[in-house]
Image (cartoon, rainbow, N blue to C red):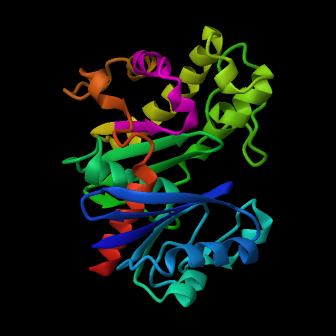
Amino acid sequence: MLYGALEAGGTKMVCAIGDENGKIYEQVSIPTLKPEDTIPKIIEYFKDKDIAALGVACFGPIDVKPQSPTYGTILNTPKIPWRNYDILKSLKEGLNLPMGFDTDVNGSLLGELTWGNAKGLTDVVYITIGTGVGAGILSGGNLVHGMLHSEAGHMKLVPVPGDNYPGHCPSHGNCLEGMAAGPAVEERWGMKGKDLVDRPEVWDLEADYIAQAITNMIMILSPQRFILGGGIMHQEQLFPLIRNKVTELVNGYISTKELDDMDSYIVPAGCKDDQGILGCIKLAMNAEG
């Protein structure tokens, strides 16, 4: 059985075909332009692929409540042409298929839960740190939505002493995204992260902010594991720094076997950057029933 996957991002739309075993047969990338330019290309790609269902993991904020009249709509996004755009309705009109729909980060978490480093767990946080920062949350075996869906990338942080950077986020300044996403790194240091590999001070500061956020979520959600993905986390030197700083911040207040094994508690994605596409395949499988 073949399933379609649409990882709908603010910069590009990744379309793929896969099966129930998590094998990806093909994928293409379509630039995210205006809906009227982008959606017809997506429909054209999928329409002759003989897929049983389509899974859509979308940038947001989005309405993920099936009972809501605006279910499937991209809400108050900074990408103005997509604001209040009913992406799910447009895709269903063009393809007439069962469709699953969730946030981009919940999609990635679902991919990790099914085929990656969250397998067998009931309480996990997946954080992506790239152009923006987002978190997908699994609690008690269920993906968390709530009033809307998690926007953990916008939790406020305490500035590190000596760091006078005000934060890149126009809404919150010194939130996690404002202090640690790719644009913040570039603005603070004058170069992209990939050109700062040999600057340990860059990654020590980055780890400070990521560790603060993880510690906050440990205290609130008590997850069994954190999985970190996104472009910034390709800087693998961050992982030991983050683990050490989280241990310092928890400061012995919580004692569990998970926190005693930080190398297994804070880990990279296990799906090698395919977690988003794989999560979409799982969304499609769930939608088919």
Judge by depth and name the residue closer to the eye, 285 or 101. 285
Q: Where on the picture, by quarter, is residue 172?
A: top right
Location of residue 174 with respect to 46 vertically, above or below: above
Judge by depth and name the residue closer to the eye, 187 or 146. 187
Q: Where on the picture, by quarter, is residue 228?
A: top left
Q: Could you say where residue 110 lies in the image, as x and y percent from the top left?
A: 35, 56
Does 155 appear in magenta?
no
Location of residue 89 with respect to 178 vertically, above or below: below
Location of residue 182 with respect to 235 vertically, above or below: below
Q: Could you say where residue 117 lies in the image, as x and y percent from the top left?
A: 29, 41
Q: Quadrant of the C terminus?
A: bottom left
Residue drawn at (73%, 18%), measured in percent from left and top? Answer: 163
Q: Quadrant of the N terminus?
A: bottom left
Judge by depth and name the residue closer to the eye, 264 or 97. 97
Q: Could you say where residue 15 lies in the image, as x and y percent from the top left?
A: 52, 63
Decide if residue 99 is on the left or right side of residue 285.
right
Does 232 appear in magenta?
yes
Residue drawn at (45%, 85%), measured in percent from left and top? Answer: 67
Q: Could you say where residue 137 lies in the image, as x and y percent from the top left?
A: 40, 52
Residue drawn at (78%, 70%), measured in percent from left and top? Answer: 81
Decide if residue 126 is on the left or right side of residue 116.
right
Q: Where on the picture, by quarter, is residue 19?
A: bottom left
How many numbered markers are drawn? 0
Decide if residue 112 is on the left or right side of residue 126.
left
- Is residue 69 in sight in this rendering? no
- Is residue 285 in sight in this rendering? yes
Magenta residues, as a range?
226-244
Residue drawn at (55%, 21%), measured in percent from left and top? Answer: 208
